[in-house]
Amino acid sequence: MQFNDLKLIEPLQRALQTEGYTTPTPIQAKAIPHILAGRDLVGCAQTGTGKTAAFALPMIQHLSTTPSRHNRRVIRGLVLAPTRELASQIGDSFAAYGRHTQIKNIVIFGGVGQQPQIDALRRGADVLVATPGRLLDLMSQGYIRLDTIEFFVLDEADRMLDMGFIHDVRKVIAALPKQRQTLLFSATMPQDIQDLADRILIDPVRVEVTPQATTVEKISQSVFHVEKKNKRALLEHILSDKALRRVLVFTRTKHGANKLVRQLDQSNIQAEAIHGNKSQSARERALLNFRTGKTRVLVATDIAARGIDVDDVTHVINYELPNEPESYVHRIGRTARAGASGTAYSLCDVEERPYLRDIEKLIRLRVPVIADHPYADAISEAAYAPPLQHNGSQRPASNGRQPSPQANGQRHNGSANPNGKSSYRRRRSRNQRTGTD
Ligand code: AMP
């Protein structure tokens, strides 16, 4: 399927050409025709699948081709997003896709002064992209009314829930007109989100793009078993390979992110942290430096990384494994965006092995172990029992051995062990498992 087949208006087709998009992604191909037909929709898709265009294109088309009932510019479309970064990126997408139309958008989020946002609201726009807290704030002060909304998108609904925004979201929804078109996107569908979808959508179409499978398949993944005290040295060793051009490193906590950046700095590895305690300008600066290649290593927490839309992240490193397996999928989805391939490494200490098992259950894939590395942690069969039997092609090691990165098709170049030290070999024989399944 091509974009031409989707019956998009000419100004949108032109904008897509400028963006260099020729083929719709699966979520776009599946969702756009239904949205153009006016249906409510639940989209099970994560960031990186092209879901922003999946809702922005038909929304711009609807707003450009359906005359407003009002004789002045009013907000007709609302997109709720969980984070400021995601909201800004959605706003940028609307501006890019709508560049040849009259559709204007405004982005509002907390953590910055409200006056410029109020001024922009006064100037008027058709689409409002907002995080829930600031939206409610400006509504309560009388700057925003939602009774003119025709089109509502709730993006990353599961993250809204995780971040404790669901009450705010409900309040926003209560202020919307009953007659509207509603789209809900979520990477996962926990029961609370399912219940919310049942309440706010009318006879929705369900569209799913199985993010786990598609994302996971494109990404070359592996895990290093390493003692906690050796993680930092191993990370530095991995980072010494300059083939890791743009690296996103994940920690579980903000404190952990700051500490790691300080430690890397001491070792002359320039890195920046991005997390919720940083000011908006610091976060934007860090993101810009990362995007432009000024900073090679960005250390992030899960929440801050939501919606980081940086193409060409070559490697994701889980310095600490997430305790929620879905976060692993979100994290590694930061690489291999829009069809590119990518690599994800996880540093797993003994306490994190249960997390690894949960992740492997979710992704239905055994993450291959790199046993041949300088800080390899000895793992026994009992301590690391494989969680599942694999089916055919996803089986990581057909010869019953842990695969080397190369055997796993990694663009690893032996980067974690470039010197081929003899200690690696000793450890390798100690660590290499046979008959692990
Ligand atoms: P999203 O999931 O909306 O965050 O989009 C992920 C990335 O894919 C963004 O960088 C988009 O610019 C890009 N993208 C979206 N749709 C397409 C497409 N049809 N072809 C190529 N790239 C796309």
Image (spheres, rainbow, N blue to C red):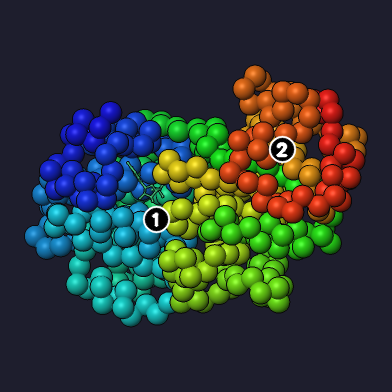
Residue drawn at (79%, 43%), measured in percent from left and top? 371
| Image x and y of residue 298, in percent | 57, 64
The residue carrying pointer 1 sits among few (fewer than 14), some (14 to 19) or many (20 or more) residues within 10 Å by Cα, namely: many
In the drawing, does residue 423 fall left or right of residue 414?
right
Which amino acid does the dot numbered 2 rest on? Ser
Q: Is residue 348 above or below residue 34?
A: below
Q: Are marks 1 and 2 in contact (CB under 8 Å)?
A: no
Rendered position, 396 above or below 338: above
Q: Which residue is mark 2?
A: 404
CB at mark 1 closer than 8 A to ligand 1? no
At which x and y percent is residue 237? 72, 60
- Given residues 248 and 86, the one toward you in this image is 248
- Residue 117: image location, x then y, percent: 32, 74
Does residue 202 appear in the picture of this structure?
A: no
Q: Is residue 109 above or below residue 249?
A: below
Q: Which mark is residue 398?
A: none
Question: Where's residue 332, x and y in %?
Answer: 57, 47
Residue 257: which quarter of the image? bottom right
Alpha carbon of mark 1 to alpha carbon of mark 2: how far?
44 Å
Query: Which residue in the protein does label 1 denote?
Result: 80
Q: Earlier in the sequence, mark 1 or mark 2?
A: 1
